[in-house]
Amino acid sequence: MPAAGCQERRAGLGGQIPVMRRRARGSPAPGAAVRGGGERERLRGDGTEEQGNRRSFSVFTKFCKGNQTQPSLRMESQPLLRGSGAHSKFPSWTLFLAVCAVGIGGTFQYGYNVSIINAPTQHIHKFLNETWSSRYHKELNPDLLTFIWSVIASIFSLGGLCGALIGGGMAIRLGRKGALLVNNIIAIVASILMGISFPTGLFELLIVGRFLIGINSGVGLCVQPLYFGEVAPKHLRGGVAMGSSIFLTGGILTGQIIGLRELLGGERHWPLLLSSSCFPAFAQLLFLPWFPESPRYLLIDRGDELSCAKALKRFHCSSEYRREMEDIQRECFALDGEKPKKPWQLFTDRGVRWQLITVIVLAMGQQLSGINAIYFYATYIFKQAGISAEEIPYVTLGTGACECLTALTCGLLIDYLGRRVLIIGGYLLMTLCSVVLTFSLTYQELYSWVPYVSMTSIFAFILSFGLGPGGITNTLTAELFIQSSRPAAYMIGGTVSWISFFTIGMLFPFIVNGLKQYCFLVFLLECSLVAAFIFLVIPETKNKSFLEIKKEFNKLNFGRNAQKKETELYERRQLHDEF
């Protein structure tokens, strides 16, 4: 098999895969031809290996940027990669801590701010009435009160939409790490505005603060999964990417706990509750600068091969980082200097047609799956089961704990069972729970034991959502696209998700009033259709590189022309190797 340019070239990676035949470590290859003395420098010992690495990386990067007039290294026989056997089952401590530093200021903020607004609802209503009376010397009309409260609650979604639209551009211009750090400034400003709204008597500051924290959440939901998907080795990519869901559910649970009336949910402390979102922002500003930027961004987008190698060495052990560097090099070669795409360019690119359809279907399916209906009916069902109104907030903590538990479980299982099994199984279990809930809510008052069936179905629905759609959706978005298309794909997926979130928030009260408990039949149909789409369209992505996943989708995108596209890429590699 001929060496294929960037794919088979291993110069500067320490030592590696034999092209002709295996030889003893440290012995020179018979007939090895190396231009520029890179092999001689590498064979002198560890002291000069780094110098050879830098030269070969520089040559490779110049080619990836389209400069094919530069000389390239060629080896006919190279040493075997050290430690090229089994993969490490666990990430390095640096990678684990980087995931924590990124997550605390990313999806954690979204979950936390969605959760904390529920606890002080009555106190904010009282604040609006008092402010209006002192300002205009008359009572606030109940309809106007409802409208102002709706604006405060829903402006968060509008901010999230704006954040999703700018998140991809920030990730390209500032880098993944830089975008997250700048995003914390927005969260701090939002926290200050919400905190001073009560002492200043300006409820308008509350609206502006909720809008800004929505922007922060939208950017975090876009950039954080992007970073996770790019820094993780492919055999751990599912588990690392699940960090987004783990921190999101952790934020929801934390917000439910902090929002208890014994803590910050009381009348005196609700401004502190809303402004407490500054603490995750400060934590990320403190810890994230100590960790590297995304290695894929450094090499493919910025062409900084030295920083890429340093980042990979920190994220992965010595036997793994070479493997990851080779994978990034292959993707860089396939891109051939292609610049990051704009969102509208993806809609006209036939090569990502079915990936884009998949992201849109999954984003809509996640928001329209019925999870909002579950939380709406939870309070009613808990009351029917005999739980007092004072105890319901503590029972609601159980729903948050369920989501958090399933996210952790999914993170442990995703790289063993695969993505398809978990997400299809999750949607099918949600379909079954919708059937049970429809019957149990219909006969809720006939038998004393029926409310407990409803309660069990609620927790089962939440567990199914966390095990499938809640966790896998963001992971698949990162895996279905290569480097040039990934930020734009997250912008599109995030936009669709936020629009769906806003739409279901506006239409859901009318759906419930019109269909009552039969609204779950609508969600039953939606869950079954999404499960069928995933089964027919989405291939398994476990332990596959981004290029291998792209090749799978080429069969759908190009049909019979897929083989022709692969032949053209092979010929390009062969011509480069001969050059």
Image (cartoon, helix red, strand yellow):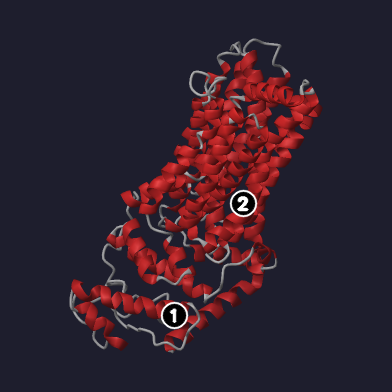
- Residue 363 visible? The answer is yes
Expressed as whole percent of the image width and height from the top left, the position of residue 235 reads 41, 55
Residue that carries the numbered disc 2 in the rendered image: 164
Closer to the camera, 114 or 572? 114
* Distance of label 2 from label 1 (alpha carbons): 33 Å
What residue is shown at x 65% (from left), y 14% (from top)? 384
Q: Quadrant of residue 315?
A: bottom left
Closer to the camera, 152 or 230? 152
Name the quarter where the C terminus is drawn.
bottom left
Expressed as whole percent of the image width and height from the top left, the position of residue 451 reads 63, 16
| Residue 48 placement, left or right of 280 | left
What residue is shown at x 60% (from left), y 24% (from top)? 120
When the figure is inspected, residue 156 is found, relative to residue 387, above or below; the finding is below
- Look at label 2 and name its amino acid: Ala
Expressed as whole percent of the image width and height from the top left, the position of residue 3 reads 40, 80
When the figure is inspected, residue 4 is found, relative to residue 508, above or below; the finding is below
Q: Secondary structure at mark 1?
A: helix
Expressed as whole percent of the image width and height from the top left, the position of residue 73 reads 35, 83
What residue is shown at x 71% (from left), y 17% (from top)? 443
- Look at label 1 and name its amino acid: Lys
Residue that carries the numbered disc 1 in the rendered image: 62
